[in-house]
Amino acid sequence: MAQFRGVDYLLIDSMLSEEELLVRQSVRQFADAEVMPLIRDCYREGRFPTHLIPKLGELGYFGANLDAYGCAGMSSVEYGLLMQELERADSGLRSFCSVQGALVMYPILTYGSKEQKDQWMPRLRTGSAVGCFGLTEPGFGSNPAGMQTTARQDNGGWILNGEKTWITNGSAADIAVVWARTPDGIRGFLVEKGTPGFTSSDLHGKMSMRASVTSSLALADCRVPASAMLPGAKGLKGPLSCLTQARYGIGWGVIGAAMDCYETARQYSILRTQFDGKPIAAHQLVQEKLAWMITEITKAQLLALHCGRLKDQGKLDPAHVSMLKRNNVGMALECARLSRDLLGANGIMDEAPIMRHMCNLETVKTYEGTDHIHALVIGERVTGIAAYK
């Protein structure tokens, strides 16, 4: 296949600044040079390319949209383009950076004490420390209000008990942001790797997100000091605000996966001949699929760009992000399926990226708010009635 040159049917690049285009190009070059040559083997072997972590930190990709402790301070659109190009390589890579920045660095910077920020932000920014976000539980995913993990005060500290699951980076993390129920409401705690009573175990047998570490966390009379609590976060607003940041990145990221699938199918359809010796791209049914994909990718680009501009203006709210995440993930998954169809039997082979993207996107559709939950968030926004309560 020819080198990827981008997907821009509606001249959307003309709406981007020179700085935004430069960010996208630099991340695109990194993904093509450092990730694409090895991601197939990582997926086959079920491992994350950990040797890239220092490079990701050096390039400023961790917490890239934060503006403190040496973070890159990117605009929301620049950050979105970063997520897009990382997920064009693989959802697992985007997920790693998204968790590190939106779900670990963001809550520490937003809700943490000065001591917590000073201790962890520089290390997380450079990748010398890895973080994870412990919210989902075995019995409570879409309903975090049903949380069963508890924290109780004892001798000036806290004792945590409970279990978290489907935790990206869990066993690789040096620090976990763990959310627990206290007599005073939901609170966040920083739990360091090696703390007595705190253990992690990887989930195996995944058919999706294989180039990503997914774990369960167990807390059994895990004692942490009083200074481990995030002082600024109280109630579900804390963890949900983190998820809004991460969902925004997903809404951009999946466009990259869709682009990779579409461009693979487009090039294949031009090169592949059948029946009369003409390329299959000359057939009407093939062109209809390509037309659907490029139209939906373009609509997703416009939605993401507008949400990015709103975010920089302080006008983007969680219900907007629900539309972004729900629409764009569904679009990307359908692009993967149509692309696989156009490649025929070749589409199921991992020589092409399509089945890898398709499997990954099945997970992305579910995590950080399922398609159904985001539909109900949108429904509440337009009717004023919360159907999920």
Image (cartoon, rainbow, N blue to C red):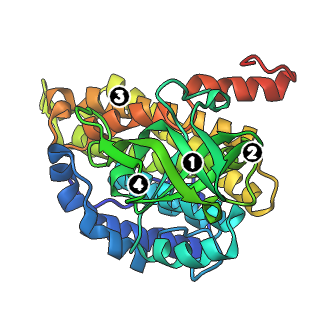
Q: Left or right of 61: which side holds 155?
A: right
Residue 284 spot, x, y in % from top left? 35, 25
- For the point 79% across and 25% down, the residue is 380
Single out the mark in the foreground, 3 or 1: 1
Bin the neighbour count of mark 3 within 10 Å (Cα to Cα): few under 14, some 14-19, many 20 and up.
many
User: Viewer-proximal residue, 229 or 124?
Assistant: 229
Q: Left or right of 234: which side holds 99?
A: left
Single out the mark in the foreground, 4 or 2: 4
Mark 2 and mark 1: span between their CA atoms? 22 Å
Mark 4 and mark 2: span between their CA atoms? 29 Å
Q: Earlier in the sequence, mark 2 or mark 1?
A: 1
Q: Earlier in the sequence, mark 4 or mark 2?
A: 4
Dot 1: what SS?
strand
Bin the neighbour count of mark 2 within 10 Å (Cα to Cα): few under 14, some 14-19, many 20 and up.
few
Q: Amino acid at mark 4?
A: Pro
Q: Earlier in the sequence, mark 3 or mark 4?
A: 4
The answer to the question of whether label 4 and label 1 lie on touching residues, with beta carbons closer than 8 A, is no
Mark 3 and mark 1: span between their CA atoms? 50 Å
Mark 2 and mark 3: span between their CA atoms? 38 Å
What residue occupies the far bottom of the structure in this picture?
A: 70
Single out the mark in the foreground, 2 or 3: 2
Q: Earlier in the sequence, mark 2 or mark 3?
A: 2
Mark number for residue 338?
Answer: 3
Q: Which residue is mark 2?
A: 237
User: Viewer-proximal residue, 231 or 376?
Assistant: 231
Mark number for residue 159?
Answer: 1
**374 relative to 227, above or below:** above
Q: Is residue 331 visible?
A: no
The answer to the question of whether label 3 and label 1 lie on touching residues, with beta carbons closer than 8 A, is no
Residue 222 spot, x, y in % from top left? 48, 49
Residue 61 spot, x, y in % from top left? 47, 70
Mark number for residue 196?
Answer: 4
